[in-house]
Image (cartoon, rainbow, N blue to C red):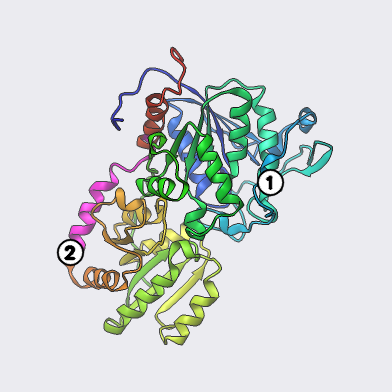
């Protein structure tokens, strides 16, 4: 399969299934779906079904259907066999399943508030279900929400015309499989994050089983990197012939520089403080570097279940005055930190992509990243280390802080790579995939 396949003059009708979407977002998954849909407008006709949306939020060339803004009376005859609840007797999944940043409260773009005047309950199979409230996409019984979303989205899809089903991550897999079963339309699954990334290779619970079944049933898989493609082959045993990696793009930003409120140089980490992101390795790296170069501050922006442990360990190692945890920050605050950073470090244990490293590179910050990441494929000139190799990561950081020629070369070479990382390239690759795998009906226009 050739990545440079020429696009044919067709605009397939795509039914997207997403879990979050602006202006209501809990993390980067919604931003990724939004930006991909925007870029695909020139190449496909896209309708997206999501749990909740703002009726006043309009996007050109995209039809957006939120389950919290539909007339629920039209859905009362939904029939569905709840086979997916039998995967494993697990009912509660917490917010750490968010594949990107986690916010303590949902973000709302442009200060818009959600004011839904639509019916708040849905009756399915004789049971009443609350329509998705604004603050709990990843809270409470997420598995129940995923199953209800599958039922309602399937009912809606029965009254729609489309060529391809395109689902994003495990939260929409039940919906995708049901719609494929009832319509016979091809199913594409876009993989942004996997249970193996979040919880480790030993995780074989309900979510893993659903991911495996969904990827087996899908006609085409679009992981966000070759790294994730390898995870799919190794840990889920999926046929590699139907895998078509599509790297994420990134929104262009206007970089700027800010003066630090202290004299020391700064090494920055941005992300959730969970196992997947390797925060404990960042602490180890900081400890090692500070042994030889005490005039540095290490800053971690993010929240997660390792927050208190990191505070305790940094105090125990007597580096608390050089190791700072900010908690959750808005994107504006993250950009402000990037404008002050001297080095960006991403020691992820298993990172499907790693958008934060690209964001740092946009601000002219040299990046030191783990080889166990998808972003290492699109930033070939970044300095890379195996996440467990604390010595190499420490050496790279010290070198970037002390060797101005190396620092300048890394920044210049990385800037060249940034020109290829955009959502238009991602959208083209998606539609090329549809056509390469013959998912688009002949003569569709």
- Is 409 displayed left or right of 132 in the figure? left
Residue sticking out furthest to the top:
443
The N terminus lies in quadrant: top left
Dots 2, 1 in contact, CB < 8 A: no
Secondary structure, mark 1, is helix
> Which residue shows up at 41% across the image and 49% down it?
234
Q: Which mark is residue 264?
A: none
Q: Is residue 268 above or below residue 36?
A: below
Q: Quadrant of residue 96?
A: bottom right
Q: Quadrant of residue 119?
A: top right
Q: Which residue is mark 2?
A: 406
The C terminus lies in quadrant: top left
As measured in the structure, the alpha-carbon distance from the residue carrying label 2 to the one carrying label 1 is 55 Å
Q: Main secondary structure of the magenta part?
A: helix
Residue situated in front as seen by the camera: 212 or 344: 212
- Is 34 displayed left or right of 1 in the figure? right
Q: Which residue is mark 1?
A: 86
> Which residue shows up at 66% across the image and 49% down it?
143
Image coordinates for residue 272, horizontal then vertical, percent = 49, 62
Residue situated in front as seen by the camera: 260 or 189: 189
Secondary structure, mark 2, is helix
Residue sticking out furthest to the right:
126
Q: Earlier in the sequence, mark 2 or mark 1?
A: 1
How many numbered callouts? 2
Q: Is residue 30 within the magenta segment? A: no
- Is 123 displayed left or right of 304 in the figure? right
> Which residue shows up at 59% across the image and 20% down it?
161
Q: Is residue 264 above or below residue 411?
A: below
> Which residue shows up at 38% across the image and 43% down it?
249
Q: Is residue 409 within the magenta segment? A: yes
Q: Is residue 330 visible?
A: no
Which segment did they paint magenta?
A: 406-424
């Amino acid at each position: 399969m050739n990545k440079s396949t020429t696009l044919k003059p067709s605009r397939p009708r795509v039914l997207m299934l997403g879990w979050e979407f602006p202006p209501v977002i809990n993390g980067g998954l919604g931003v990724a779906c939004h930006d991909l849909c925007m870029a695909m407008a020139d190449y496909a006709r896209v309708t997206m079904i999501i749990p909740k949306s703002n009726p006043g939020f309009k996007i050109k060339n995209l039809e957006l259907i939120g389950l919290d803004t539909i007339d629920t009376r039209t859905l009362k005859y939904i029939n569905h066999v709840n086979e997916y609840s039998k995967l494993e007797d697990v009912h509660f999944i917490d917010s750490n399943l968010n594949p990107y940043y986690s916010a303590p409260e949902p973000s709302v773009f442009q200060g818009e508030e959600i004011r839904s005047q639509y019916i708040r309950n849905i009756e399915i199979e004789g049971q009443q279900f609350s329509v998705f409230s604004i603050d709990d996409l990843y809270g409470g019984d997420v598995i129940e929400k995923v199953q209800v979303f599958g039922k309602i989205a399937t009912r809606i899809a029965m009254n729609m015309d489309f060529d391809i089903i395109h689902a994003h991550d495990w939260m929409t897999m039940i919906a995708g499989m049901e719609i494929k079963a009832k319509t016979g339309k091809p199913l594409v699954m876009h993989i942004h994050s996997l249970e193996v990334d979040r919880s480790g290779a030993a995780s074989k619970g309900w979510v893993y089983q659903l991911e495996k079944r969904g990827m087996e049933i899908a006609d085409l898989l679009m992981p966000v990197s070759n790294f994730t493609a390898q995870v799919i082959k190794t840990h889920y045993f999926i046929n590699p012939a139907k895998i078509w990696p599509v790297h994420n793009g990134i929104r262009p930003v206007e970089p700027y520089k800010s003066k630090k409120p202290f004299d020391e140089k700064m090494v920055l980490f941005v992300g959730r403080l969970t196992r997947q992101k390797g925060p404990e390795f960042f602490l180890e790296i900081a400890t090692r570097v500070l042994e030889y170069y005490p005039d540095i501050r290490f800053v971690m922006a993010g929240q997660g279940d390792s927050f208190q442990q990191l505070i305790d360990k940094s105090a125990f190692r007597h580096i608390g005055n050089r190791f700072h945890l900010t908690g959750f920050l808005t994107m504006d605050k993250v950009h402000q930190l990037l404008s002050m950073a001297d080095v960006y470090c991403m020691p992820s244990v298993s990172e499907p992509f790693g958008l934060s490293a690209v964001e740092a590179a946009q601000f002219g910050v040299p990046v030191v990243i783990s080889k166990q990441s998808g972003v290492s494929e699109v930033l070939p000139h970044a300095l890379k280390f195996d996440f467990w190799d604390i010595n190499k990561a420490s050496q790279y950081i010290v070198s970037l802080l002390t060797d101005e020629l190396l620092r300048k070369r890394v920044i210049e070479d990385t800037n060249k790579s940034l020109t290829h990382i955009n959502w238009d390239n991602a959208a083209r690759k998606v539609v090329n995939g549809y056509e390469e795998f013959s998912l688009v009906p002949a003569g569709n226009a």
